[in-house]
Amino acid sequence: MKKITSALLLWVMAAAVPSFAQEVASRVVEDGGTGKYSAVMITDASLPTHTIFRPKDIDGFKGKKALPLIVWGNGACFDSPFEHVNFLNEIASHGFMVVAIGTMPKETGEQNKGRSVATKLKDAMDWAIAQNSDKQSAYYKKIDTKNIGIAGMSCGGLQALEIAPDPRVKTLLVANSGIFIEAMRGNAMPNMPQLDKTHLTKIHTPTLYLLGGPSDIAYKNGMDDVAHLNHVPVFVGNLDVGHGGTYAKPHGGDFAKVATAWFSWKLKGDKKASKLFTGETPDITKMPGWSFEKKNMK
């Protein structure tokens, strides 16, 4: 896949955005991931505001084997997924189309730390659905638009929560995040989605929380969300690694393993993957350091 210079990339992105997919830059993260399908990180001219992670070879993904879609919001609501490339690429290598808010991370130098908005998650869904229906697109009938997951970390987790009521969403992942308890008293953090706990009643899908244990600054907020969620299946996994999770570890560490299993279960119907979460003693307990709680899950 041919790379282009930064200057040319900026020119392309500034030009009229084409309606069909047109790759303008790509990079392999780590070794492409541990999954069956070596993944690649892409900037596409038809969606220059986002970064795509997907299997490098997509020829075999069609019909019942089409790629489930995951849309991702970044920590601090950054407008680039530079903190999460190992994690997102690893998930993609297991046969998913992952579209993250923001521009492709740079290999060197200052990263894009501009702020993003939650509606960019909707933009990612809109784009994927349009590409899947466009005969000119490389993604024509290759994206499983009936199986969409929405996810995010920290501020990006709040973005995911904000958009989670969208009827197109099939499952929700909230990582190192939760609606601020203080929001009920009007003290939500500025520059973040301004949600309160009543918003949780709008969630309509099975939901996974991944938290970094009591040392995670979002731990209390996340666990309080779980306490409030009584109308949908919810699972919370805790690993005492703090707010930073394991995203930067090789292949995204344990957080990537758990997230991939959840999406494989909820978006692909993978019964083997479901064992990490089901039963009186889920297989997550076999992973060192993890604890869990779950509700409304049979």
Image (cartoon, rainbow, N blue to C red):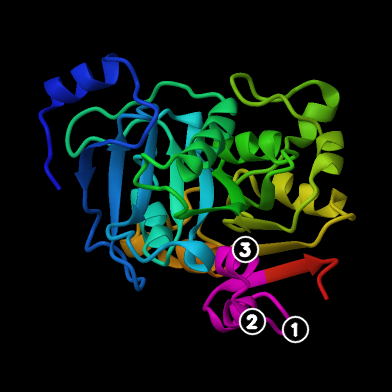
**Residue in view at x 67 percent, y 47 percent:** 169
**On the image, numbered disc 1 is attached to which residue?**
279
**On the image, numbered disc 3 is attached to which residue?**
238
Question: Furthest residue to the front?
Answer: 135
**On the image, numbered disc 2 is attached to which residue?**
275
The stretch in magenta equals 262-291
| Rendering coords of residue 177 (x, y %) | 63, 44
Residue 41 horizontal side relative to residue 189, left or right: left
Q: Are marks 1 and 3 in contact (CB under 8 Å)?
A: no
* Nearest to the observer: residue 241 or residue 142: 142
The amino acid sitting under disc 2 is: Lys
Q: Secondary structure at mark 2?
A: loop
The amino acid sitting under disc 3 is: Asn
Instruction: Give the number of callouts.
Output: 3
**Residue in view at x 74 percent, y 58 percent:** 206
| Rendering coords of residue 37 (x, y %) | 33, 68
Q: Are marks 2 and 1 in contact (CB under 8 Å)?
A: yes
State which tag comes first along the sequence, 2 or 3: 3
Residue 154, labelled with which disc?
none
The amino acid sitting under disc 1 is: Gly
Question: Which part of the image, by quadrant, shows the C terminus?
Answer: bottom right
| Rendering coords of residue 157 (x, y %) | 60, 41
Label 3 crowd bin: few (<14), some (14–19), many (20+), radius 10 Å: many
Mark in the foreground, 2 or 3: 2
**Separation (CA) of disc 2 from disc 1:** 7 Å
Residue 175 appears in view: no
